Amino acid sequence: MADLTTGPPLRRIVGFALPLTAANLVGQSYVLIDSIVVGRYVGIEGLAAVGAAGPLFYLLNAMFIGLSTAFTIRLAHLRGAQQDGERRGVVLSLALVTVIWSVGCIILATVLARPVLGLMGIHGDLADDCFVFISTLSIGFPAIFGGAAVSAYFRGLGDSRSAMWVAAFGSVLNIVLVWWFVSPLRMGIRGAALATVLASTAALLAGLAYAARRYPLAAGDGRPAVRRELVDAVRLGFPLASQHIILALGIMILVWIIQGYGEVVLAAFTVVARIELFTAMVFLDFSGGVTAFVAQNLGGEHRARARRGLLQTIYLTIGVSLAVSAVVLLARGPIAGLFTDDAEARALTERYLLIIYPFLALYTVMVVAHGYLNGSRRTTAPLICTVIAFVCVQLPFAYFLNGPFGIDAVMWAVVASWTAGLAYTAFCLRGVLFDRTAPVLPVPADPLETSKS
């Protein structure tokens, strides 16, 4: 278990984040390759179906993202406070949440998929393809969510390398299977979903075996406080989960707006979403590194060190994001051509990249700063940021202006959202970012620690 309370702050954060980045880049390579394979062997219709089904899966995944992050923060706080004996209760709570949520999502995906697709304006053959994809994928929900839980466990212990190897194993297997099922076996988008199911299952089994061997749980004193840990996880994770739920619902509204322009436009937006997530992954991992770093250091009362780590990571983030933007802008033509030969879809993809990528640094600095807020248990602030940036800015911008300005308004709405989100985040952290005499904001009291005293 890595100790993030000693050594150079930036080196510790980068050392924590890079293994996760390596694993997630492999994982997002699978997502890109999956889209390329579907686009090449199934066609524009397949790309549009996968893109339309994506927000529905994200909605099902949203609550679990928040809860698993809460468990990561809790484990990191225990690690920083040298209270490893309480880990058993956290692990049992995480396992219980994973099982319940997986079963619930299988039922929800089966019952609600078609009505939700109808609300998004997805009908006919496209709706049928979307349902095939999401219903097949639902078979693997226990493995998909279970893998996310194992990753949250490793990250909470400061062991991002183990999370990297398990995720990389599943991603590489996924890449092989999706090509085999969609290309030689001609299984279409059902094959793409089935590849994810099988690869996720294999990765989960590998992760559980490694976790049991590397970090065996001690018997501990007394009965594990499972109920108490569940309550704290829900309290801490609900704002995080709500943030992702709002994003998922908002993306559904965007799909509803975009689908009126036809399958070609929806396919182009699917491609850009894949590229955007791939390039953003390193910054999301920096954010996760900052969360674990801040949680451990505030747990150990190293407040000035937590602030220094945030600022150094922001400086690094700006430089890296500018480099990434330059690469994507220069290579936007070949990148678009990887996914489809459709001239209109390629042109739309290039235009979308040309509009949003000069402003990528706005997004990346915002998500890294959210890592500090999450690590200091201020998980409500990123939620409010999402409401302001996405609900109050991006969606109205796209809805009201796409009439007079066309699809370009939907693209520029992304930039407007990033600008508003960064402005609010900077306001929340003004004492940390701009006031050198006040190195960090106070940390709210941990109710678990209070109840023990």
Image (spheres, rainbow, N blue to C red):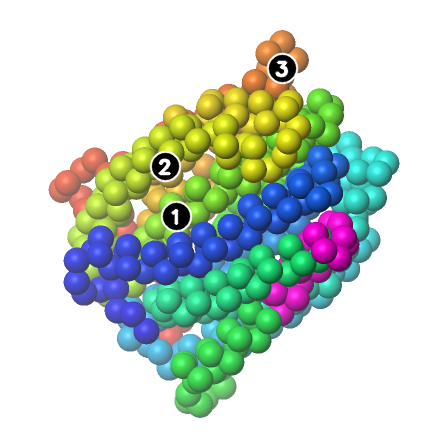
As drawn, the label of residue 248 is none
Q: Residue at x 17, y 58 (%)?
A: 8
The amino acid type, in three-letter code, at marker 1 is Val
As drawn, the label of residue 282 is 1
Viewer-side residue, 310 vs 380? 310
Farthest-out residue, right: 124
CB atoms at circles 1 and 2 under 8 Å apart?
A: yes
Closer to the observer: label 1 or label 2?
Answer: 2
**Span of residues in magenta:** 183-201
In the image, taking residue 431 as reference, residue 447 lies left or right, namely: right
Farthest-out residue, left: 437
As drawn, the label of residue 324 is 2
In the image, taking residue 258 as reference, residue 152 lies left or right, namely: left
Can residue 189 be found in the magenta stretch? yes
Q: Residues within 10 Å of mark 2 (few under 14, many from 20)?
A: some
Measuring from the top left, give residue 249's x and y in whole percent: 64, 39
Can residue 6 be found in the magenta stretch? no
- Marks 1 and 2, Cα distance to the nearest angstrom? 10 Å
Dominant secondary structure of the magenta stretch? helix
Q: Which of marks 1 and 2 is nearer the N terminus?
A: 1
- The image shows residue 69, relative to residue 351, as above or below, that is below
- Marks 1 and 3, Cα distance to the nearest angstrom? 32 Å
Q: Mark 3 points at which residue?
A: 406
Residue 74 in view (yes/no): no
Measuring from the top left, give residue 200's x and y in whole percent: 60, 65
Q: Which residue is drawn at 45% across and 52% down?
A: 25
Q: In which quarter of the image is the C terminus?
A: bottom left
The amino acid type, in three-letter code, at marker 3 is Gly
Check disc 2 and report its element: helix, strand or loop. Answer: helix
Quarter of the image for residue 423 reads top left
